[in-house]
Structure formats: structure tokens, C-alpha cells
Image: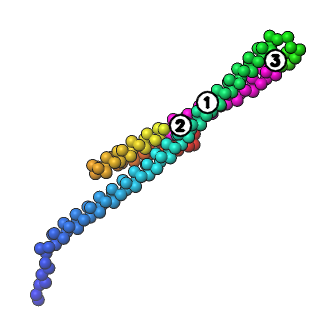
């Protein structure tokens, strides 16, 4: 019986080509994963930035409201002081009325200040999230350029911390 000869001279070249092609496909899929995760980091960074800006604006508005209330409080105090120095027949009744109004105005001013502080807390937490997302995006870009996968894992870890602050800033 005659032996069948299998041509093997091109087999080695074909295997090497297949290995190289496989490596390129893996690199492309790895780069795609990095690109997609980086895009998600950018989305979260944008959302956190928008929310941080909103809370900063609200803090300023609430602080202005508090300042207005404190000015109103002082005006009532001045009126009460003037009334106490006058010889008006309703002096006692008006003076008591002004003091009651001052107490209500003081409550509103303090509530606005507390609201302003709460918005600043939200802003601060969300600003941390934005910072961490931006750092992770930069490291992710370096990972793509240098083809160092461990840098991508570091950027994912930093993103997890950013996500923690993002969720905390929303729920706080």
C-alpha cells in the first residue's frame, strides 16, 4: 500500500498567519472594550458634572434667599426698635407683632441656609465623581496608546470609585 503524503511545507506559514490574525483580532476586541468603557466613563463624567453644576447653582440661589430673609429680619428689627422709641398708642402691640414676624423670618432664613449647605454637599460629592471619571478617562487613553491592559484595569478601578461618589451624590 502506498503512503499518502501530506504537503507540510506551507503548514508552518499558515499556522503563523493564523496566529498573527488571531492576535490582531484580540487586540481589536481589547481596544474596543477599552473604547466602550472609556465612552461610558465620559457619559458618567458628563452627568456628574451637570448635576454638580445644578447643585452649585441651587446653593447660590438658596444663599441669596437666605441673605434676603436676613435683610428682611433686620428691617423688622429696625422697625421694632423705632416703634419702641416712639410714643405711638399701639406701640406694644406693633412691637410684639414685629418680634413675631422676625421669628418667622429667622426660621425661613435658617432653612434657606441649610438648603444651601445641603446643595453644596451634593456639589462637592459629585465634583469628586467628575474628577475621578476624568482621571480614569486619561488613564484609559494611555492604556490604549501604550497597549498596557493593566492601565485599563486601573482606570476601571478608579471609575468604580467615581461611580460610588456619583451614586452617593444622587442619593445623599
Picture quarter containing residue 70? top right
Q: Secondary structure at mark 2?
A: helix
Q: Where does the magenta region start and end? A: 97-126
Q: CA distance from mark 2 to mark 1?
A: 14 Å
User: In the picture, which quadrant includes the N terminus?
Assistant: bottom left
Whether residue 33 is situated above or below residue 55 in the rendered picture = below
Inspect this view and state whether residue 154 appears. no
Compare marks 3 and 1 and give the one earlier in the sequence.
Answer: 1
| Disc 3: which residue | 95
Q: CA distance from mark 3 to mark 1?
A: 28 Å
Picture quarter containing residue 33? bottom left
Compare marks 2 and 1 and give the one earlier in the sequence.
Answer: 1
Residue at 59% x, 37% y: name it: 58
Inspect this view and state whether residue 32 appears. yes
Q: Residues within 10 Å of mark 3 (few under 14, many from 20)?
A: some
| Disc 2: which residue | 123
Residue at 43% x, 48% y: name it: 42
Residue at 75% x, 27% y: name it: 104
* Residue 153 position within the rendered picture, expressed as x and y whole percent measured from the top left: 36, 48
User: In the picture, which quadrant includes the C terminus?
Assistant: top right
Q: CA distance from mark 2 to mark 3?
A: 42 Å
| Disc 1: which residue | 63
Amino acid at each position: 500500500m502506498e503512503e499518502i503524503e501530506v504537503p507540510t511545507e506551507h503548514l508552518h506559514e499558515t499556522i503563523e498567519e493564523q496566529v498573527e490574525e488571531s492576535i490582531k483580532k484580540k487586540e481589536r476586541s481589547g481596544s474596543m472594550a477599552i473604547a466602550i468603557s472609556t465612552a461610558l466613563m465620559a457619559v458618567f463624567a458628563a452627568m456628574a458634572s451637570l448635576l454638580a453644576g445644578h447643585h452649585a447653582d441651587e446653593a447660590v440661589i438658596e444663599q441669596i434667599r437666605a441673605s434676603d430673609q436676613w435683610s428682611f429680619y433686620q428691617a423688622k428689627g429696625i422697625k421694632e426698635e423705632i416703634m419702641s422709641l416712639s410714643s405711638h398708642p399701639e406701640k406694644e402691640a406693633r412691637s410684639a407683632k414685629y418680634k413675631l414676624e422676625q421669628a418667622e423670618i429667622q426660621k425661613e432664613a435658617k432653612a434657606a441656609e441649610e438648603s444651601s449647605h445641603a446643595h453644596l454637599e451634593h456639589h462637592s460629592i459629585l465634583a469628586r465623581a467628575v474628577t475621578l471619571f476624568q482621571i480614569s478617562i486619561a488613564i484609559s487613553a494611555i492604556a490604549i496608546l501604550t497597549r498596557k491592559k493593566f492601565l485599563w484595569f486601573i482606570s476601571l478601578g478608579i471609575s468604580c470609585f467615581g461611580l460610588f461618589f456619583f451614586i452617593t451624590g444622587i442619593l445623599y
